Structure formats: structure tokens, C-alpha cells
């Protein structure tokens, strides 16, 4: 397997689905606590951490739009869902003794700070875990794109994306027994092979800003992934 570089500041993308545990919808608090403990593990290594939270466990714009709602409206509702998830994760992280800030891309000053780039960086320098909610603040985007955007803005060394499987495969390994797993890929590989790991705009943004993406299984602690003890696929430009 690939040896991973030492990271100083990372962005972890937490999908909405990761927060629902074995439930079909919404938040499973023991699961949220487990993810929070996992994040604390990374923080305790001395790595600055920020998070981008998804909303798919509550509301997914695209699927509601497919049932007749105007796409932009549905997407705004999806972004609001990510704020709820952000607050839930903040609650768990603070109970574990971490200092946190929820920052919303849609101004909502009674519940979250508005997004101001330099302020967010300052929070991290002060040892606070920053939770980015409301995606990019724009409809027609995903939280994966928000994750690469914030990773670029925050000067993160890497973007970590937890999934159901231990990396990127040539096909869905749960359906195709012939699917092969990659240890390392370039952004170009992901786009040209049309590998379903993130949307193309998220990959393109990461490529333009040379942000390595680490894809790993959420069943492994993030700390093990960072130490190279658990498998992952790294997407980056070849040296
Ligand atoms: N969304 C959006 N703009 C963004 C990020 C998210 O409109 O920049 C909306 C979109 O409708 C999406 C929903 O918010 O379906 C929830 O985000 P996503 O599906 O990316 O969450 P995840 O799959 O990570 O749970």
C-alpha cells in the first residue's frame, strides 16, 4: 500500500447517510457520537480538523425534484438539512470536550456563524473543530463539491471522504465480483474512467487546486486510515 504523507490540516467529509446508522432516515445519536469520537481521535493527533456535513439522511434535493418540486427550492431544503446534521455533530463533539464552531454558507446568525474564510482559518488555528454546513450555499451543487471548495479555501493538505467500501473500485464491488480496488489514482483516471466516487465538479476542483483525496471505509477509524493501517485509495497527481 501507499505511504501517506503527514497531514497538518485536513477536511473530513461526513455524508448524511453516515449519521443515520442502521436507520432508514434521520439521525442515530449513538452513531453520531461514534463519528464524533473518531474526529476527536484525529484532533488528539495534533491535526487541525474541519468538516463538511451532508444532508442525504434527511433531504436530497435531486430526488425530491424528480418528484416534481422545483430543483432550486429542493436544493435549498437539502442545504437546510445539512445545518441540522451540523448542529447534531457539534453537540456530540462539545460533549467530548472539543471546542467547535458551526459555520453556515447560508447566513443564519442565530444558530451558526456566517462563512468568513479568514475567520474560519483562525478558528482552526485556535484549536477549534470547524463544521461547515449548508454546502456551498448554492443550489445545483453537492456537499462533495462544498468539501473540495472548503478544503481549498482552508489550505487543507487533504480531503478525506468516508464511504461504504475501503476505497475506489473499477465497479461497484457490492454488485460486481470482478471489480478491482485501486491504491492510487490520478484525478484524470477518476474522470476518464468515470469512477463513481464523487461528482465531476468536485474532482475537477480538487485537481485544479492539487488537493489529495483519500477515500476510505467508514467502518474504520479515521486515525487508522491516516496511519496507513487501514486501506484507502489516494487520488492525486502523479509526482
Ligand atoms: N446541496 C446544494 N448545494 C450544495 C450542497 C448541497 O444544493 O452546495 C443540497 C442538495 O439538494 C443535496 C442536499 O443539499 O441533495 C444534501 O447534500 P448531499 O446530497 O450532498 O449530502 P450527502 O450525500 O453527503 O448526505
Image: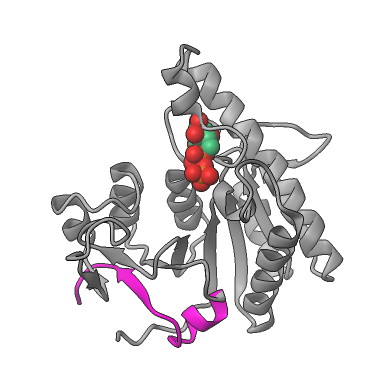
Task: Tell me where residue 230 appears, x and y as whole percent.
Answer: 44, 82
Identify whether 10 is placed above or below 80: below
Q: Is residue 37 magenta?
A: no
Residue 5 placement, left or right of 11: left
Residue extending farthest left: 192
The residue sitting at 62% across, 71% down in the picture is 48
Q: Is residue 225 magenta?
A: yes
The residue sitting at 70% across, 58% down in the picture is 32
Camera-side residue: 57 or 2? 57
- The quarter of the rendered structure image containing the C terminus is bottom left
Numbered-mark total: 0
In the rendered image, which quarter is residue 217 located in? bottom left
The residue sitting at 39% across, 79% down in the picture is 231
Identify whether 125 is placed above or below 78: below
Task: Tell me where residue 186 appears, x and y as whole percent.
Answer: 21, 65
Task: Tell me where residue 33 appears, x and y as whole percent.
Answer: 74, 64
In the rendered image, which quarter is residue 99 located in? bottom right
Look at the image and give the residue range highlighted in magenta: 222-239
The residue sitting at 52% across, 26% down in the picture is 75
How is the rendered protein coloured?
Answer: one colour
Residue 47 placement, left or right of 94: left
Camera-side residue: 207 or 38? 38
Identify whether 47 is placed above or below 139: below
Whether residue 136 appears in this view of the structure is no
- The quarter of the rendered structure image containing the N terminus is bottom left
Whether residue 132 appears in this view of the structure is yes
Identify whether 237 is placed above or below 58: below
Task: Tell me where residue 81 appears, x and y as whole percent.
Answer: 64, 35
Amino acid at each position: 500500500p501507499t505511504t501517506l504523507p503527514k497531514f497538518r490540516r485536513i477536511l473530513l467529509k461526513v455524508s448524511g447517510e453516515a449519521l443515520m446508522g442502521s436507520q432508514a432516515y434521520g439521525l442515530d445519536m449513538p452513531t453520531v457520537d461514534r463519528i464524533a469520537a473518531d474526529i476527536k481521535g484525529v484532533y488528539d493527533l495534533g491535526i487541525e480538523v474541519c468538516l463538511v456535513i451532508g444532508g442525504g439522511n434527511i433531504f436530497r434535493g435531486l430526488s425530491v425534484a424528480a418528484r416534481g418540486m422545483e430543483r432550486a427550492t429542493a436544493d435549498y431544503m437539502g442545504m437546510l438539512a445539512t445545518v441540522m446534521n451540523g448542529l447534531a455533530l457539534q453537540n456530540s463533539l462539545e460533549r467530548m470536550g472539543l471546542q467547535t464552531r458551526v459555520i453556515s454558507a447560508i447566513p443564519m446568525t442565530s444558530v451558526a456563524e456566517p462563512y468568513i474564510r479568514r475567520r474560519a482559518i483562525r478558528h482552526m488555528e485556535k484549536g477549534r473543530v470547524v463544521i461547515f454546513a449548508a454546502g456551498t450555499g448554492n443550489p445545483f451543487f453537492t456537499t462533495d463539491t462544498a468539501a473540495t471548495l472548503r478544503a481549498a479555501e482552508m489550505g487543507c493538505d487533504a480531503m478525506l471522504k468516508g464511504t461504504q467500501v475501503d476505497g475506489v473500485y473499477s465497479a461497484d464491488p457490492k454488485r460486481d465480483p470482478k471489480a478491482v480496488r485501486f491504491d492510487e489514482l490520478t484525478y484524470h483516471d477518476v474522470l476518464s474512467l468515470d469512477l463513481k466516487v464523487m461528482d465531476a465538479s468536485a474532482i475537477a476542483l480538487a485537481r485544479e487546486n492539487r488537493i489529495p483525496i483519500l477515500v476510505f471505509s467508514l467502518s474504520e477509524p479515521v486515525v487508522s486510515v491516516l496511519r496507513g493501517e487501514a486501506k484507502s485509495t489516494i487520488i492525486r497527481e502523479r509526482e
